[in-house]
Image: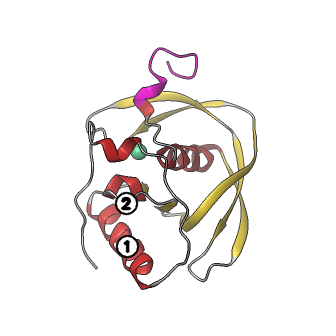
Amino acid sequence: MAVLPLRTLPDPRLRLKAKRVRTVDASILKLIDDMIDTMHHVNGVGLAAPQVGENLTLFVIQTPALELVAVNPEITKQAGQDWYTETCLSIPGRRMTIKRPKLIKFRYQDLNGIWHSAKFHDFYAAIVAHELDHLKGVLITDYLGTSEAR
Ligand SMILES: [Zn+2]
């Protein structure tokens, strides 16, 4: 267990398209543990692997109501739109209001490699959309000047 250094803009690792996790082996389990420690340390609600410099499709979410480790997440459905004000651990001090889906359905693998489906609404859908963006190298500031931000 360890707190990892957070990658912040303009670190180029935040801009890569993340690669699939082939097997959840001991090194991935350690990474997940360290990501959870890191997220707690900085009081975050979500953290994607690229934010600690690992180019892998993996994120963790932890709020009082939700704990999730999602390996190889893929969106299966999204619906509706609403505005959410977001911050990002990789862009300290920045706050953006972004249009996000009101409902997001996605599938992911757990720590045993078993696939699950999950459905999140509203604030939680926005968190998931934010973390999924990280896996594509997309950051909240990319929405600046588009109809998706205000
Ligand atoms: Zn972020």
Amino acid type of the residue that numbered disc 1 sits on in the rendered structure = Leu
- Is disc 1 surrounded by few (<14), some (14 to 19) or many (20+) residues within 10 Å? some
Residue at the image position 67 percent from the left and 37 percent from the top: 101
Image position, residue 62 (x, y; %): 47, 63
Is there any visible trace of residue 136 in the rendered image?
yes
- Above-or-below relation of 34 to 92: below
**Quadrant location, ligand no. 1:** top left
Q: Are marks 1 and 2 in contact (CB under 8 Å)?
A: yes
- Above-or-below relation of 16 to 97: below
What label does residue 43 carry, if any?
Answer: none
* SS label for mark 1: helix
Q: Which residue is mark 1?
A: 31
Q: CA distance from mark 1 to mark 2?
A: 9 Å
Q: Quadrant of the N terminus?
A: bottom left
Residue at the image position 52 percent from the left and 79 percent from the top: 24
Examine the structure image and report whether residue 145 is included in the region drawn in magenta.
Answer: yes
Bounds of the magenta segment: 141-150
With 11 as the anchor, is 145 left or right in this view?
right
Please give the count of numbered marks on the rendered protein. Answer: 2
Quadrant position of residue 96: top left
Q: Nearer the viewer, mark 1 or mark 2?
A: 2
- Above-or-below relation of 121 to 144: below
- Above-or-below relation of 84 to 48: above
Is there any visible trace of residue 89 in the rendered image?
no
Earlier residue among tags 1 and 2: 1
Image position, residue 12 (x, y; %): 31, 42
Q: Which residue is mark 2?
A: 54
Residue at the image position 43 percent from the left and 76 percent from the top: 28
* SS label for mark 2: loop
